[in-house]
Image: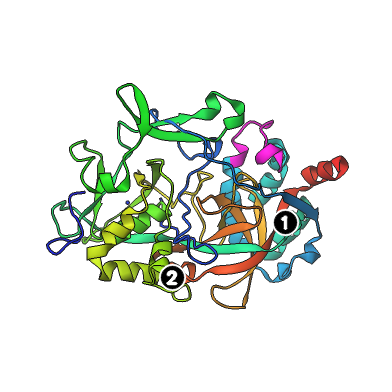
Amino acid sequence: MAAQFGAGTRHRRLVSIGFSAVLLALLAACNGEAPPEEAAEPAPPATVAVPTPAPATEPSLLLTPVSFADLPGWTADPVAEALPALLKSCARLTRQPGERAVGPEGLAGQVADWAAPCAALAAVDGEDDAGLRSLLEESFQPFAVSDAGETEGLFTGYYEAELKGTRDPAAPGATPLYRVPQDLVTVDLGSFRADLRGERLVGQVRDGRLVPYLTRKEIDAGALNGQGAELLWAADPVDVFFLHVQGSGRVVYPDGSTKRVGFAGSNGHTFYAIGRALIDEGILSRKDSSMQSIRDWLRANPERAQEIMQRNARYIFFREITGEGPIGAQGVALTPGRSLAVDSKLLPLGVPLYLDTTWPATDKPLRRLMVAQDVGSAIKGAVRGDFFWGSGEPALAEAGRMKQKGVYYLLLPKAVAERRQRAS
């Protein structure tokens, strides 16, 4: 990296900050790594993917039919606020072949099952809460989601960061955001074996062999220099690090112009939560740990910050996003306060969910209709979500404090629900 942390110089997907249960996962990232069939754009042509170890025990997702009257606060939620998110997901979903399964093992039926509900949603008055609520009750069946019977799970928050940009690569603190390098190779192992669907290995070819790709430390040291892979330059290396964790953001230049960037690929290395290191070394306490406190410590301790950040060998590459954004894993622009990141290995993307949790760091109920539109490397499990708060510092203030217990309900078209009930 051209600029390093040091005395002479200070020193890159939606900056979504999702925290783990005790923040040991420092920034449980929502970095837009979508399943191949949900990706907003095709993966770069030369990419290699290898299987990751399966967890010791796979979560067991169970769906229990309930009534809308069982959804706490259902009649109080201004559901019309969720209509833009619903319509974006419907448009994305219904462009696919009608016989295509929706979700893992067709959990949410086929695309054809969504045609009528989506058409009805498109005809609703965007300001009519009562009309939309009535339509949802007529068209959908809610199901309580549980993990082997345990309905309560963890809900964290994330946001889209704003970074200061610079057009001068030699400026103090200037840090590059890289495009996917030409020598990065990704292999989709599902192309070779059906049981490896969704498993990918990332690396580069050396002497005819596929080897792991460059680490964060190697890239920071300049391993990509001279390849012309720089997309743009940001002014603060700590902001860039958190952008890597989150996956997308907006870069604002001194003249007021902006560029939005999003996840394009990674170096394939395992994510390491630097918050764990700061807690283990007694630098921060678990009680006082937050995204903000970690960021502040890194900025105040540049002599150690680079080494700490480089413990996370995972490195993210970006692309410029034009138009509306940020873009979630389903390939649609996220809606603040109505988009939720979920575990897409268990739940479908693009479907409505009713969330019952609490506002960040409080016991105040937070109950609203959401749409599953994103994923995250730390968002794993049948009852686990990452709440998208929007952009900038106000969104960070909520996202950085959100580590709430809660439950959610999956809304399925009635035709799908009826088939499920007959099958059971």
Q: Check the image and report above or below for 192 versus 145.
A: above
Q: Which residue is mark 2?
A: 290
Judged from the image, the secondary structure of the residue bearing numbered disc 1 is strand
Numbered label attached to residue 146: 1
Q: Label 2 vs label 1: CA separation?
A: 28 Å
Quarter of the rendering containing residue 124: bottom right
Span colored in magenta: 93-107
Applied colour scheme:
rainbow
Is 357 or 119 nearer to us in this picture? 357
Instruction: Give the residue furthest to the top.
Output: 208
Q: Residue at position x 55%, y 28% from top?
A: 190
Residue 294, visible in the rendered structure: yes
Numbered label attached to residue 92: none
Q: Main structural element of the magenta stretch: helix, strand or loop?
A: loop
* Image quarter of the C terminus: top right
Is 372 or 307 nearer to us in this picture? 307
